[in-house]
Each structure stands twice: as C-alpha cells, then as structure tokens.
Image: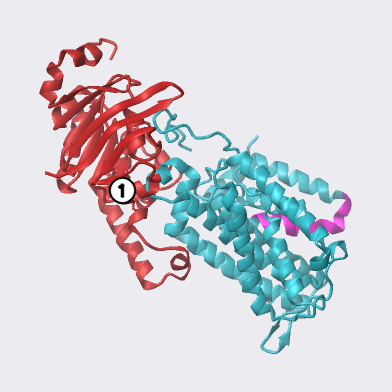
Chain colours: A red, B cyan
Amino acid sequence: MSIVLETRQVTKNFGGLMAVNRVDLVVPERAIASVIGPNGAGKTTFFNCVSGFYTPEEGQIEFQGQSLVGVPPYQIARAGIARTYQNIRLFPAMTALENILVGRHSRLKTGLIGAIVRPSAAVREEQTASQYALELLDLVGLMGEANTLARNLPYGDQRRLEVARALANDPTLLMLDEPTAGMNPQETRDMMAFILRIRDEFSLTILLIEHDMRVVMGVSDQVSVLDYGVKIAEGTPAEVQANPIVIEAYLGRPTE
Amino acid sequence: MRSRFVTTLFERIRSDVPAMQWFLRGLTGLLIIALLVIPLIPFQQQALWVRVIGYTGLYIVLGLGLNVILGFGGLLHLGFVTFYAIGAYTYAILASDLFGYHLSFWVVLPLAATLAAFTGILLGIPVLRTRGDYLAIITLGFGEITRILITNLRSLTKGSQGIIGIDDPVLFGVTFDSGTHYYYLIFAFAIFVIFITTRLSNSRVGRAWNAMREDEDVARMTGINTGHYKLLAFAVGGFIGGLAGVIFAAWQGSIFPDNFNLFVSINVLCLIIIGGVGSIPGVIVGALALIALPDILRQFSEYRLLIFGLLLVIMMILRPAGFLPSKRLQIELGQAREDPPPDNAASTTGGKAS
C-alpha cells in the first residue's frame, strides 16, 4: 500500500512556543488516521502546516512523494488536499451551491475571457460543475438548500456543507478538523457512518482531528497522540487506549 | 424610526415572484426605450437632460469598474481616478493637435484601456499583501500621485494648461460632434460594461472573487490563487476606468489635471456604497442619486445641498446597505484586522442570520 502523506520532524513554533515539535506521521493510502490530543496540543497547527497556511521551520512534508513545504496553499489544494475547519469557515454570504462550486475551483478552467464570451465549452463546464455540486449537496443531505445562503443554514448543515465543499475538490487526502464538534450523539454517529462512506465512495485517505473518543475509536485505522506539540504515542485505537502515557496525558484527565 | 412601508416595498421588489420579475423586466425595457428616445423628441431643457444623463452614464461605467475591484474583489481602492486619467490622457495625447497624432478613437480606445489595465496590475503588485485600511491609504496615494504627475509632466501633458482640441470619434463617416452623439456612445458603452460585469459576476471568476472577499485564507486553501485574482480585479477595473476616461476626453474636447482630482474617486466610491456594494443595478441607482440628481436639482441651487444631505440621511436610516444591495452585502470595508489563523478564529458564519 502506497503512502499518501508523510511528515518528518515537522516543527512549527510561535515565538518560542513549540506548537508542533518534530512530528513524524505516515498515512497510508485509504487509511483513516486520527490525530488526538488535549486542547492546545498542536493538532490544528499541524493541519495548517500540511495545508500550507503555515510553513514549518523544520522538517519535511511529502504528499504522494512531492514536498509541500513552501508550496502556496492554493497549489496544495490543487494537488489534491482538501480540508474542513474546527470553527466552520464557509463563505457565509454565498449560497450552499456556490460554496461547493468554489470548492471545485481548481478542477475548472474558465478564465476571464471564457467568463465574458461564454463559449460552449465554458457553458458546458459550468453545467457539469453545477450538476456535480447538486449531487454533492444531495450526498450530504442538503438537496433543498442549494440557494440558501450558507450563514442561514443550521449549524449541523453548515458542518456537512463544509465537507461537501472539500469533496468538490476531488481530493486524495481529506483533512477533517473536529467534524463532530458540537454535535449530539445521534448526529455524531451519523457523521461517523458518513466518514466511512465517503472514504469508500471517493477512495479517500482521511486525516482526522477529533476529541470525541467514540469517533476516534470507531473509525480510525491508526491514532497518533500529540501533547505539547510532541507526538507521544501512535498505534491502533486499542494500543493507544491502553498506553499509560496516553492515559496520563489525555484520556485520564477528567477535565477533558 | 424605520418606515415599515418603504422597507416592505423594497423587500417586495426584491422578491423572487415570477410576476414581479416580469414586471421588473418590463420596467427595465421601458426605461431603456425612454432613454433611447429622450434625445430625439424635443422638449424644454433637452440639451441639459441629454448632458446630465450622459454624464450619469459615464459615472455608471466608472462605478461598474470600481465595483469589480471593491464589490467583487473586496479591495478598497481609493485611487480609481488613476485609471480614468490614464484613459483620458492617452486619448488626448494620441488624438489631438498637441503632438499632431490623430489616431482613430477606435484604435486608441482599446489601447488606452489596456494601458490602464496594466497600470492596475503594476500598482497592484506591491499592495498584494496589504488589506483593508492599508490598501485604501496606498491607493489613495496613487490617485493623488497621478494628478500631481499629470500636472508636472508638462512636456507630455502641458500641465495645468491642459490639452485642448481633442478629436471627436468618427464612426461610419459620422463625426461625433453633438451631445446627442455622445449620449448614444456612452449609452452603448454602459450597456457593454453592464453586460461584461454581469457575466463575470456569474462565473467561476466572479465566484473566486466573492470567496476571496469573504474569507481570503480559506479561499487560498480551497484552491484559489488569490494574488492572481486580486491583480485580475485591478486589471478589469482599470480597463473599465480607462474606457470611461477615453470617452470623457473625447466628449469634453479638452482635459485638465483638475478633472482628475480626489473627488472623482470619492464620488465613484460613494455612488457604489449608496447603490449597494457589489450590486450592478445598485451602481446605476447610485449614479442616478449621486450624479444625476444634484445636476437636476441645480435649478434649486440654494436648496440643493440641503435636499442632497437629507436624502443621504434618509438613505442611511432606511437602507444602510444601499438602495439595491447585492445578494451578499457582507463587504467589510474596514477589514484591517489580519484574519486569525483557522484554528482559533471565531466562527464567522454562525448566528448572523438576517
């Protein structure tokens, strides 16, 4: 099985605070890899390094054998990495359909002249894209909401729309940052089933940040634990759960 | 107190009822026909009206140009007059007695507009990384630099003496030498610019601009090359501003540095804001309110400013987002804050239902 994402010794610090400290991670194709850890452990910062929002000070990030360090975010997206955000970040004043079409941006070609002249190729491309966007809306259960502004959607719908926007990019690697945050147990179970389903339907490799242990244990093939920016453990869900270091750092804390 | 009646009236006009859409289309058609025949049927003060409407049309073109930069791209550009000036001076230099070049209007028009577009890109490159207030201040500076340059580059622009005797366009043997000719010229260009900006707005390009305006960081991580799209917005806006400049120079027949002062930029900005940022019909309404109305009210000159001020106040109370706000009026003019990184940003989507 080939490796989709590999990071070596990735380090990012903010003025002396080591947010991510020498993190190694290997994600094989079509795996669901989870990154867990207490609040402030550096999980999202690690995501931001992979998606190009931050450039790590040290270390290597390779996506399908290509280095991502220093590559601008839009090219990383184009290469096939899509993500969602811990605090939903849709384009609030655009409709649900438009949000998905923006997600598909790098798979479309129409430029300035094409947009003005509208040759048949551009018209066809737009139709095909809209059709696909509607299918994705249907997939996430938002069929009737195509023309609703994103900010007017209920919270759970916004979360699912964000996943649909990410899927529109035809990603190889999908990074989900706490997809079940703020969801009730039933919604959480639905989201777990949904994650497994899209992994199979879209042949995805998924990198997941999650706080909810039931989700992590339920869907992950491998789990990596971060604490203060350092990877302190890694393994199958069962191994990690039994690891005393992890229990001490994370699982055993009543405050979590 | 907010007037319920007026507000609901506007809500109704904007509703998606098919009958209302047909009504609006019919109204637009009638308006276009009325505008087309105004110069043909004689009436009192016709010349004044033709001039005022022509002038308003020119500002509609300018407004649509800035609307691409500010309304679509979300880039607060306060030096839009630069593009207008470049268009006007390019035509004036290449089609007047000044150097004896008398190039055709139709040759200079695309040339001057392209030059303005390139200026947009050139000025855009250094300010790519600035946002909000900083961008506004830098572009404000560019606008003033333009005026100072054309005042002082005497060998090229004759400075404050201005360039006079600018050629009229000739089309199919007809020389454009009356207000009516220019009226139709401007009308045609306004329609042309409305057409291209509408098409741009409903396209992959327009969506990319919108996304960039709403959340630049997320747009980048979604695959949009925001640097490219910012420069594209400056280029398209510059092109349109350049077009307006060429037409202005030909129409006036003489231009002076003072035609390109700060107030041109401010006026264009205001008409966009009054009409509704990002909205193409809004630009038209804004130009009517800000350019046509003051001119028509000139006969009541003592009360002109009073009426104008009153209108602005009423406007701001009733329609703070503009007369015809765009579907997404989320423009954040004062977005000087650097957006926090995606991990600890406050949700920008939740709870703003309106």
In this rendering, position of residue B80 left or right of residue A22: right
Which segment is the magenta one? B286-302
Which percent across, then down, holds residue A131? 29, 58
- Amino acid type shown at disc 1: Gly
Residue nearer the viewer, B3 or A17: A17
Depth check: A129 or A84 in front? A84
Q: Quadrant of the N terminus of chain A?
A: top left
Compare residues B209 and A236 and report the one nearer the observer: A236
User: Is A141 located above or below residue A108 in the figure?
Assistant: above
Q: Which residue is tagged 1?
A: A144
For the image shown, how many numbered marks are present on the structure? Answer: 1
The quarter of the picture where the C terminus of chain A appears is top left
Residue furthest bottom in the image: B173
Residue drawn 75% across and 81% down?
A: B102
Residue A17 percent across, percent down from the top left: 41, 21
A41 shown above or below A99? above
Q: Quadrant of residue B152?
A: bottom right
Q: Is residue B291 magenta?
A: yes
Is residue B126 covered in magenta? no
